[in-house]
Amino acid sequence: MALKKEQLVKLYTNMVRARKADETMVKGLQEGKVVSFYHSGQGEEAVGVGGCTFLNEDDYVYAQHRGHGIAHILAKGASLKGFIAEHYGKATGASGGIAGFHFVEPERGILGGAGTIGWTFPVALGSALALKKRGKAQVVVAFFGDGASNRGTLHEAMNLASVWKLPVVWVCHNNLYAQFMPIRDAYAKEDIADLAAGYGMPGVVVDGQDVIAVHEAVQAAVERARAGDGPSLIECKTYRYRAHSEGADIAHYAPRDPEEIEAWKKRDPIKLFQEKLLEQGVLTEADIERIDKEVTSEMEDVERFAIESPLPDPSILEKALYAD
Amino acid sequence: MREIRFIQAINEALAEEMERDETVFIIGEDVQSGVFGASRGLVEKFGPERVMDTPLSETAVAGSAFGAAMAGYRPIADFMFADFMFIAANEIMNNAAKWHFIHGGRVNVPVVFFGNIGGGARVGPEHSQCPETIFMHTPGLKVALPSTPYDAKGLLKTAIRDNNPVVYFYHKRLLGIPGDIPEEEYTVPFGVADVKREGKDVTVVATSNMVQLSLQVAGELDGKVSVEVVDPRTLEPLDIDTIVKSVQKTGRVVIVDEDTLRCSVSAEIGMQIMERAFDSLDAPIKRVGAANLPIAGGYMEQYVLPQPKDIVEAIEAVTG
């Protein structure tokens, strides 16, 4: 089903928000305001935004570490204030300042995250199992990177999700590098989506720079999952512009060809979508300028909120260990 | 009261909690058959969707359970042998244990990680461990290890109802022991130690099957040494107050736990006694545990694991 004009504008706006939020995070880290670390997701916005913008509020999303999930969580409707304030170590952060970087907003189907890559597979499996038991046609969309696909947890979870026909959509950001390691040294084939055949589910490769392509692939898989037909695997071919972690080299033992980076930047997901929307007459130059201004102002508000928020009281630590 | 065996007590706790709360389910390898008898017969009553068999996929067992726990269920992840929990250490220790805390208390993880522990079957190093120390050491996990049918049932019911991850260990050598339980509904609270035998000369703090061995030794020494046996029942939360109270009475302590001695439960409890009740001690604390070796199989097992004579020698050393 073709998207309506306001839906196209929402996708575009969410990508701009994701990019500017990421830039805010990079700046915040450089200025010493972000207390922990940051793994920029610039270049990969179409995956999180295309995958999450049109999910239902009660669907679950497990994000991955690119941009610390910023594109996924904002597209799911979560609070950027809680996200940035958490990274600033403030009491108003999503996790009260305890996590530093894990984001949570259960009211929006974001149940949290962890720091050991590949954790997503078994956890998403469990939440999808719960949703199947509940029987209300909710789905889990679980994001992971090409690096995570090397974990054994992928095998255990993808196999069982298929055996049990669970409502989960596995979405891979294949950005060609796991920290420094190029995928050619880590994976014997070209497409991670090929794994799907071994688990008896559909697997598709999409252009991860094309937000509409991502959206359509995820939507088809979500509908299949809601209908009780089980999981799907979607591989989004994408690219990260910056280092694995801010402050690190972008490449080390296997230097990246500068032409590779430039070629991918020519296919920037925001630029591509902007050109398309201008061409289709969905947006005008004036609209683009207005959106840019609005998002810039939103980020200023979010940043100011984080700066002005108080530090957490250490007494919250003992209380947070156990639920009553 | 009626007499039942330890494994029946566990089975009853599972059945009663599944009856009481339909969000409770069991998941693990061959739980429908129930390898040790814990979940035997439950699939006939509750169906395969609530007694879920899995293939050999321990990370998926742990993840299924705690991922479902976050989404509103109360799963029991059965690892068969507790040794196999190490395969899912990331899911249990890095994820489930930390989740509630690290997300500022916004998500509850009501899951039970369930496994059989201990030696005595001479089946070697990956089917015989008592791994309670490493779980007690991990913040965010509660640890229950019953020594009697009464405690087995009451602690498991509490574990299932708890809104946090609980690791529940039951020992091979206890499966068949009989004990009295009430006809009516009951639970055993966490963090409340039980004085299994009163005495005045020496306090033996013991866990799981070591409680039974210590009671046997206490009986043999009756008339010579009056032994008090204290069972913490849960290691986290730990009822150090009851232990300290006993030490203040006897002035002498032996701590008996089947896990490897180095950095063990007994080291932790011993140090807490030093911090809390040093002035009450009339002799240095003695500890009994497994040698700092992997658990040998076959006839060699007995030379690694603590034996009743080790408990006797320790009691004699602190009371001599």
Image: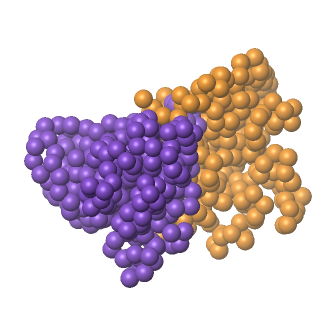
Chain colours: A orange, B purple
Quick check: B243 above or below A126?
above
Nearer the observer, A238 or A291:
A238
Q: Name the residue furthest right.
A: A258
Q: In which quarter of the image is the C terminus of chain A?
A: top left
Residue at position x 55%, y 40% in the image: B278
Tell me the residue at 32%/36% (across/down): B189
* Residue B60 appearing in the image: no
Q: x and y percent of residue A219 in the render?
A: 50, 45
Q: How many marks?
A: 0
Q: Position of residue B293 (x, y in %)?
A: 53, 72
The one of A85 and A27 positioned closer to us in this rendering:
A85
In-image side of B53 versus A180 (left or right): left
- Horizontal side of residue A201 vs A175, given as left or right: left
Q: Could you say which quadrant of the image residue B19 lies in? A: top left
Q: Can residue B289 be seen in this view?
A: yes
Q: Where is residue A156 in the image (x, y as percent from the top left)?
A: 47, 63
In the image as oriented, which residue stretches furthest toward the bottom?
B299
Q: Is residue A33 left or right of residue A173?
A: right
Horizontal side of A175 relative to A153 (left or right) equals right
Residue drawn 82% across the image and 36% down it: A29
In front of the other: B187 or B247: B247
Place of residue A297 in the rendered image (x, y in percent of width and height, measured from the top left): 77, 20
Residue A148 picture quarter: bottom right
Which residue: 42% across, 81% down?
B300
Q: In which quarter of the image is residue B108?
A: top left
